[in-house]
Image (cartoon, rainbow, N blue to C red):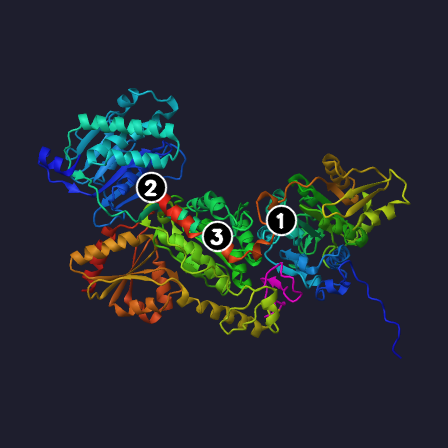
Amino acid sequence: MAVTELQSTTGLKPIVNDFCMTVCTVNGSGSATANNIIYRALYQMGIPVSGKNIFPSNIMGMATWFVIRVNDDGFIGRVPHDDIVVAMNPGTLVKETAYLPEGGVIFYADHITVPEGHREDLIYYPMPIKELIKTVDVPRNLVAYLENMLYVGIVSQVLGIELSELRIAVEHQFIGRDAIIESNFGIIKLGYEWAAENVEKRDRFVVERRPFNKNLIMTDGNTAAGIGSLFGGLQFCSWYPITPATSMVEAAIAKVDELRKDPVTGKTTCVILQVEDELAAAGAAVGAGWAGLRSMTSTSGPGICLMAENIGLAYFTETPVVIWNVQRVGPSTGLPTRTAQGDLSFMYNVGHGDINHIILIPGTVNECFEFGWKSLDIAERYQTPIFVLSDLDLGMNTWVTEKFEYPSTPIDRGKLIWEEELEKIEDWGRYKDIDGDGIPYRTVMGNQSPKSAYFTRGTGHDVYGNYNEDPKNWSDMLHRIEKKLNGAIENLPKPIVIKGKDARIGIIGMGSTDDAIRETQAELAKQGIETDYMRIRALPSCCEVREFIEEHERNYVLELNRDGQLKEILMLEHSDLSEKLISLTDIGGLPMTAIWAVENILAAEEEYA
Amino acid sequence: MPSTVEKKVERNLIGLTLSDYAGKKSTLCPGCGHTAIANVIQAAVYELGLAPEQVVKISGIGCSSKSPNYFLNRSFGFNGLHGRMPTLVTGACFADYKIEILGISGDGDTASIGLSHFKHIIRRNVPMLYIIENNGVYGLTKGQFSATSDQGLVLKHQGENLLPPLDMCMEALISGAPFVARAFSGDTKQMKEIFKAAIAQEGTAVVDVISPCVTFNNRAEAMQSYTWGRMNQTPLQAIKHFNTKEEIDEETETIEPGTFSEIQLQDGSYLMLRKLDKDYDPSDKAAALDILTESYKKHYFATGLIYFSEVPPTIQERYDLPEEPLNRIGIERLRPTPAMLDKINYDFGV
């Protein structure tokens, strides 16, 4: 129902493009497809929108939720309450209504019983799902699935989502499969028309077309990372399935033939190989990196635990390799299908002995693409494992994001040398610091010069790779590696800073909490508290990070883990500024909300004022 | 007075001398079986006429895995992690598939901590010579039981071994290896011929070398000792490798027909198997399993080529890779075009 229509027929003041709607279904019923059609139609209408799938670690039969938020100001992070609930799961209806404020809206399948007298303050829209589905000829095995398309039609009609956009969204969902497009859209249309004739609109939520999404695309962080890696000249990827990282490699598999056909020979230049466990995934990636291939593996926290010994080996043998961690909730198996930022501390120093790593932290889907290619360059430049720290929210949820930008710099293979360059170096040694930047020159197998070979080992070695236990040699080696990595710091992705007006208070965040923190910044400004917001995109932290902390009276470090891991790292790296850092943390497995952040910052501000 | 006769230095097919294949001085115990293996590898690669630059040595952790330092100085080597040698090989093998990979491991590496990697690299059929330097004991940690130790073996700090051993040839066979052999550090002649054949053949070639640990497990009654090996070794055939058809023809001319078989290997070289006391057909997998079971039961030490089959596609053959080494492909051939990205943006867009 259109806005003007709503006003003229009901006299209600409409709430345009500003609501959060949760669709509650049973997992395995095919509802993800239905929800994506609604989500995509809203995106096509140009409205700022997000969709988050909150799902169980289960294949079929448990409760699952899909949360859609539309907001004209572009604030589309998670909110802790709903304005609208679509209840398709008989088991959870009553529970879901707890998230609705007074005047909230609930669409429900009318075979679900609402207890008499329950929440009379809500606006109920019963949907005759079972009855309607009987009116069409549907294969028995598809009934449950197509019932979902009915709510797509009904809810869309009541909210004003255009039927023509639903059609396009369906076509996008089932590209080229005409019969499936027709049958799905037929059911959506049935629901839509039924609602137009039978539903009297009593709520105020409506959507209206906007011009915002013309230059934006819709995809998830894992897809972006997988494709980004292929644009980075990835040549070898070994992996082992794990939620929520699996879809990254699967995205690369889907595109590798198309994107990585060698223009000269027509053959493929990238190998993707599933192996027996994460030990092997890391080992093979290290082996490939050592042998001169641009190499990567992708996993989540439990996989990183298994990869730890290979990470130490790669660090000390100075082997380039990229390791993606799409974080889930730990410790242990934890909450495999929920999101967190709890692996930062572990990743920063994973491995035993004197060890530290470079971590890149994408905060948007577009950055997942960018860091996909860039990480391979950084790994080869500094001859070390590079971690990219994503999370389930960023990786698995579909986001509306900036278009992918073509890599701005050519592929960098660092100081990888072949016969000719080797010939020019007098007294080459694999670990010899010839340029004084701590980065040695690297030869790889296949080099035909009799001088090129060396013996790589995880044990103590001298600059030629020979076994060595001498204390000074060991110390020199470790300090040279330190120097090499320190030299990387200012060449890593810089933080993004969004300034307030003469702000004295800083907010520091990382990764997928970006939406929530930008909204927090705006909400605090409304309440008279100006803040500057810095999103850190790489560790160790660079000089801009230090300056930001220094410039503000106090800095709230917001993150999704218990102990304030980012804050701890910043305290270590800038210990003289530690009093300027205040930790605010949230755990529970769900994306951060601005409401939580605002509440906590306000409470803290009261204390400091 | 200096001799006026220059000693003639022997050279192989590509004009290199044996010393071009040398390694560093061994730091293993004097008499260690692994030193014998290191010397045999050196000789085998030399005799095959492979340039050291065309060989890569990758190992795990332990006495055995230190040994790649003691041969082929001019070959790249990677002494990696305990049990994980096959994983490094799996990645490295794609960089340049014309390079011959020698995987060196021990029984701790392969029969215990890395058993799954062992079986999976065979399943992938990564082309390599996979050597298990099997001494039935952990040497570098000073004498603990391994998964191939004899049942009943007594060690100083360990007491008696209660568990039966794994037979690594058996494990290789049932995992699908197309080349399985057993050798003995006390019989370097046979070992060399086996290594040459294993290198000449594509696919994962597994050679379990019983290689005595003179310090911790060399008592005469121990099944991995020199004494027991020498007394009980039962070669399944006399084995000899030839680089060319002419060489093998010259050899077989004088041998009674029907007492030997001739196999052409994938690199074009030849293998001759001469019948000894009993008939043994190494192309019969069931016979191979039988001989391993029987030799364990009856306490004899079957060595030689245990199994040999057609080589299934190697892991590289399962991908459509360019002829030239992947690690030498220029960067301009590794990045998709801007138009390809435009298409992705279009597909993902409104």
> Label 3 vs label 1: CA separation?
20 Å
Q: Which residues are magenta?
A: A443-467
| The N terminus of chain A lies in quadrant | top left
Q: Are marks 1 and 2 on the same chain?
A: no
Is A463 included in the stretch rendered in magenta? yes
Name the residue at 36% across, 31% down: A29
Q: Chain of mark 1?
A: B
Amino acid type of the residue tagged 3 in the rendering: Cys
Instruction: Note whether residue B254 is visible.
Output: yes
- The residue pinned by badge 2 equals A54
The disc at residue A281 is none
Circle 3 — which element?
A: helix
Question: In front here: A1 or B323?
Answer: B323
Circle 1 — which element?
A: helix
Amino acid type of the residue tagged 2 in the rendering: Ile
Q: Chain of mark 2?
A: A
* Nearest to viewer (mark 1 / mark 2): 2
Task: Please give left or right for residue A351 compared with residue A19 in the image.
Answer: right
Q: Position of residue B231 (x, y in %)?
A: 83, 49
Amino acid type of the residue tagged 1 in the rendering: Ser
- The residue pinned by badge 3 equals A305
Instruction: Note whether residue A338 is visible.
Output: no
User: In the rendered structure, are the residues bearing label 3 and label 2 in contact, judged by CB atoms less than 8 Å apart?
Assistant: no
The disc at residue B112 is 1
